[in-house]
Image (spheres, rainbow, N blue to C red):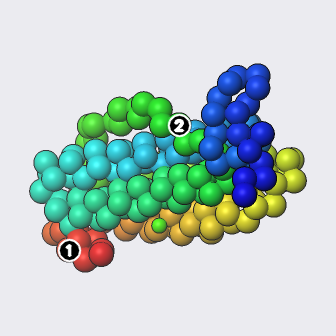
């Protein structure tokens, strides 16, 4: 039985949606799609940082960035799957080219920290929208991201502080590098 068959073709746009009803608003669908793009951008940014860190032989730092990049992809996919689950349409836009040059590991981590603070702001803005729309399901899904951003900011700041403390002392920097390289 196909109870919502009539609703499958949108009469105004003639758009076919074989899954029937959309359970998120158009505004929310756009906001979530934008966040999918930003999470893929984060993956790209961290890969770009990994590439830079390889050029200065900080292979542990680069490993840490690769793992972080993988995580960002999983963030994108979490929202991707949620949009699908709610009968929405995932639309993938172009991914902006990330910055490619830094002058030190410290500068890289200043950017990581600033970037994660920006991402937290984006997540909070979608939470605000979910509250405004009384969209409890999206609100609940986003709570995972709210918690994740606390961890992201904390760990970025932790490494940034360590790098700031050791400054340009190469031996100490390699000690941190060895430790960061253990990230799975
Ligand atoms: Fe993320
Ligand atoms: Ca994380």
Between 38 and 166, the one nearer to me in the picture: 38
How far is the residue under mark 2 from the one under mark 1? 40 Å
Label 1 crowd bin: few (<14), some (14–19), many (20+), radius 10 Å: some
108 displayed left or right of 8: left
Q: Can residue 90 be seen here?
A: yes
Identify the residue shown where x is 71% and y is 39%: 8
Quarter of the picture holding the C terminus:
bottom left
The mark closer to the camera, 2 or 1, is: 2
Between 175 and 59, the one nearer to me in the picture: 59
147 displayed left or right of 41: right
**Mark sitting earlier along the chain (2/1):** 2
- Tag 1 residue: 178
Residue 44 screen position, x and y as percent: 35, 45
Label 2 crowd bin: few (<14), some (14–19), many (20+), radius 10 Å: some
184 displayed left or right of 22: left
Quarter of the picture holding the N terminus:
bottom right
- Residue most toward the front? 1
**Image quadrant of residue 145?**
bottom right
Q: How many badges with numbers are in the image? A: 2
Vertical side of 156 occupied by 114: above or below:
above
Residue 107 screen position, x and y as percent: 35, 47
- Tag 2 residue: 91
Between 105 and 67, the one nearer to me in the picture: 67
What is the secondary structure assignment of the residue under circle 1?
A: helix
């Amino acid at each position: 039985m196909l109870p919502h068959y009539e609703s499958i073709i949108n009469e105004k746009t003639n758009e076919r949606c074989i899954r029937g009803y959309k359970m998120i608003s158009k505004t929310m669908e756009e906001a979530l799609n934008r966040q999918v793009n930003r999470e893929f951008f984060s993956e790209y940014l961290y890969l770009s940082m990994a590439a830079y860190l390889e050029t200065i032989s900080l292979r542990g730092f680069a490993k840490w960035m690769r793992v972080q990049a993988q995580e960002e992809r999983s963030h994108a996919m979490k929202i991707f799957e949620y949009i699908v689950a709610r009968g929405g349409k995932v639309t993938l836009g172009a991914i902006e080219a990330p910055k490619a040059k830094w002058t030190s590991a410290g500068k890289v981590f200043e950017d990581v920290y600033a970037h994660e603070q920006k991402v937290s702001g984006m997540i909070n803005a979608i939470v605000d929208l979910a509250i405004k729309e009384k969209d409890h399901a999206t609100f609940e899904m986003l709570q995972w991201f709210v918690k994740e951003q606390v961890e992201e900011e904390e760990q970025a700041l932790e490494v940034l502080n360590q790098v700031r403390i050791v400054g340009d002392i190469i031996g100490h920097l390699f000690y941190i590098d060895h430790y960061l390289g253990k990230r799975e």
